[in-house]
Image (cartoon, rainbow, N blue to C red):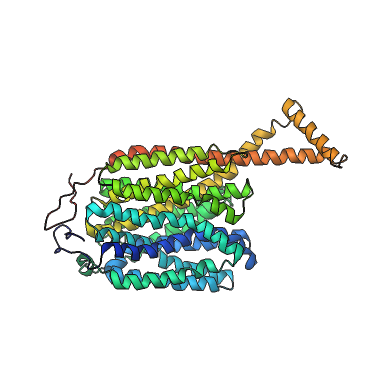
């Protein structure tokens, strides 16, 4: 790192030979490619189902298979980096991810596509934590805020670009190109990382240990069963299905066994002891909750625009794209404010802005102007970097450098699991709240309600004038019921957005758990030492 970094003074001063900003560009390419791929495939699922003659329910395994393998490898990143070297491991992952992307695009049946997605997830699982660890190690503490701001540009902007790009590709070309576009990006990332990235001394001289096969098996068990439950639980009526109850029990027991094993193992797959660090524990808890909010918002907005406002896949993607403008503006501002303002203040402001934007989205109705939606989306995009940049740097700010690789694996895993929970919870609530709202609204559809009587009479007269007097009453009731369904669906979206706002507010007290490190730099050490 610039200025020289020692980790517990066990290693000599070290800084990368290449300019850290060039390194940031190199590692961000792989991350951008992986994050883009998690969102770009969502809008293509109906096209994939149609071209392969499968049901939309079967097509969701294209997403689930990727997430399961991605989450499992993500937690193995620390051990794999220590064993094979972080640079070599990162290059291998990019090769696997790029090759699997080509296989996805060439798949001729759903089985081949799912296998390719599993391999792609294995390659993509390590890209984010490895990139974060390399980035944080390459910059001195006082410059990590700007570095994370630059990194956040890719992480935050990719999910915004994904639906728009995916909608454009599937509407005007073929869904296969959503995978083929990874090939040139992957080749460029390989070239830059090979030339610029190097392993620090504590990676080169890390003690080699055997793979924790028991921990890996338990991890695969509880994450795999959990992801299947979250993905298919709503369709199976959750605990109403016997297999769901079994999977929930297996996942819970597998998780408890995994935690117990990792805490007592001499060579754990994932060093959970890092959660004893107060800052990291608080940051991981918040990022889990924010993962729920961000992934749920990303899933809800296009669905609202397409189902209630009749937007096409491309139009809905374009409608949410202004979120990127808010993110870019915040990144440019927050990176420079990190060393001026208390990071806890920035995190609190980000959470409250995110809560406010979610609450404003909870004011939507069928007659809302597009500008009102766009303004909320821009504000939501601005709040995200304001929260994530100081949150990430503060969460790992009091850890030793050799702990960062393991910590970023846990951090990213919790964000992804939070995202899975967010999508699953909001999907369930959309259905359940819509049903409850419809039951409430139909109680007003009665001759005893003067407003209903006036509306049904007006509909009958209008339909009769248009040449259908015999069917006027039946069609009028159909229009009334269609309006009831639309209003109940709108209420379910409103409920979800307001619930997300409440969750953001509930995270605010956790910010007070953070204790910021004091940066003490000298000629011998440029790393910030944690005090207290």
Residue 354, position as x, y percentages in the image: 43, 42
> Looking at the figure, which quarter contains the N terminus?
bottom left
- Identified at 21% across, 46% down, the residue is 517
Q: Residue 105 vs residue 86: left or right?
A: right
Q: Is residue 97 visible?
A: no
- Identified at 58% across, 49% down, the residue is 303
Residue 257, position as x, y percentages in the image: 36, 55
Query: In this rendering, is residue 352 above or below 205?
Result: above
Q: Residue furthest left?
A: 523
- In this orientation, which residue lies closer to the viewer: 183 or 94? 183
- In this orientation, which residue lies closer to the viewer: 4 or 42? 4
Instruction: Give the quarter of the image for residue 365.
Output: top right
> Looking at the figure, which quarter contains the C terminus?
top left
Residue 367, position as x, y percentages in the image: 62, 38
Q: Residue 242 vs residue 202: left or right?
A: right
- Identified at 30% across, 53% down, the residue is 146
Q: Is residue 122 visible?
A: yes
- In this orientation, which residue lies closer to the viewer: 69 or 286? 286
Residue 350, position as x, y percentages in the image: 38, 42
């Amino acid at each position: 790192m610039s200025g020289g970094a020692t980790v517990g003074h066990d290693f000599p001063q070290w800084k990368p030979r290449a300019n850290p900003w060039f390194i940031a560009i190199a590692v961000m390419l792989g991350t951008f490619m992986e994050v883009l791929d998690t969102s770009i495939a969502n809008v293509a699922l109906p096209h994939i189902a149609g071209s392969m003659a499968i049901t939309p329910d079967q097509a969701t395994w294209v997403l689930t298979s990727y997430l399961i393998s991605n989450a499992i490898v993500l937690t193995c990143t620390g051990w794999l980096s220590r064993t094979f070297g972080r640079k070599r491991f990162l290059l291998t992952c990019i090769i696997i991810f790029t090759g699997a992307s080509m296989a996805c695009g060439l798949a001729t049946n759903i089985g081949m596509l799912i296998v390719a997605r599993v391999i792609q997830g294995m390659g993509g699982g390590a890209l984010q934590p490895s990139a974060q660890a390399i980035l944080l190690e390459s910059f001195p503490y006082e410059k990590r805020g700007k570095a994370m701001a630059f990194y956040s540009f890719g992480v935050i902007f990719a999910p915004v670009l994904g639906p728009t790009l995916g909608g454009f590709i599937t509407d005007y070309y073929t869904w296969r190109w959503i995978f083929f576009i990874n090939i040139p990006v992957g080749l460029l990332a390989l070239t830059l990382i090979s030339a610029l990235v190097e392993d620090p001394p504590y990676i080169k001289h890390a003690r080699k240990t055997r793979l924790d096969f028991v921990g890996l098996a338990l991890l695969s068990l509880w994450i795999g069963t959990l992801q299947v439950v979250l993905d298919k639980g709503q369709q199976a009526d959750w605990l109403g299905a016997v297999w769901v109850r079994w999977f929930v029990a297996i996942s819970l027991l597998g998780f408890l066994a995994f935690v117990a094993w990792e805490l007592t193992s001499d060579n754990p797959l994932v060093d959970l002891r890092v959660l004893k660090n107060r800052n990291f524990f608080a940051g991981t808890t918040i990022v889990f909750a924010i993962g729920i909010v961000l992934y749920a918002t990303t899933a809800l907005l296009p669905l609202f625009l397409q189902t209630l406002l009749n937007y096409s896949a491309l139009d809905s993607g374009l409608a949410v794209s202004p979120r990127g403008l808010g993110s870019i503006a915040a990144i440019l501002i927050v990176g420079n404010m990190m060393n001026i303002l208390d990071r806890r203040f920035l995190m609190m402001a980000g959470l409250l802005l995110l809560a406010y934007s979610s609450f404003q989205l909870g004011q939507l109705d069928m007659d809302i102007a597009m500008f009102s939606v766009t303004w909320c989306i821009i504000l939501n995009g601005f709040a995200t970097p304001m929260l994530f940049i100081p949150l990430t740097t503060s969460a790992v700010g009091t850890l030793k450098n050799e702990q960062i690789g393991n910590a970023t694996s846990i951090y990213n895993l919790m964000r992804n699991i939070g995202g899975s929970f967010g999508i699953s919870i909001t999907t369930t609530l959309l259905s359940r709240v819509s049903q409850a709202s419809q039951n409430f609204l139909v109680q007003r559809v009665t001759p005893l309600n003067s407003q209903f009587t006036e509306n049904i009479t007006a509909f009958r007269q209008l339909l009769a004038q248009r040449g259908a007097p015999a069917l006027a009453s039946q069609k009028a009731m159909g229009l009334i019921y269609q309006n009831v369904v639309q209003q109940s669906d709108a209420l379910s979206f409103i409920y979800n957005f307001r619930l997300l706002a409440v969750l953001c507010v509930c995270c605010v007290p956790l910010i007070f758990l953070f204790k910021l490190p004091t940066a003490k730099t000298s000629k011998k050490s440029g790393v910030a030492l944690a005090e207290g």
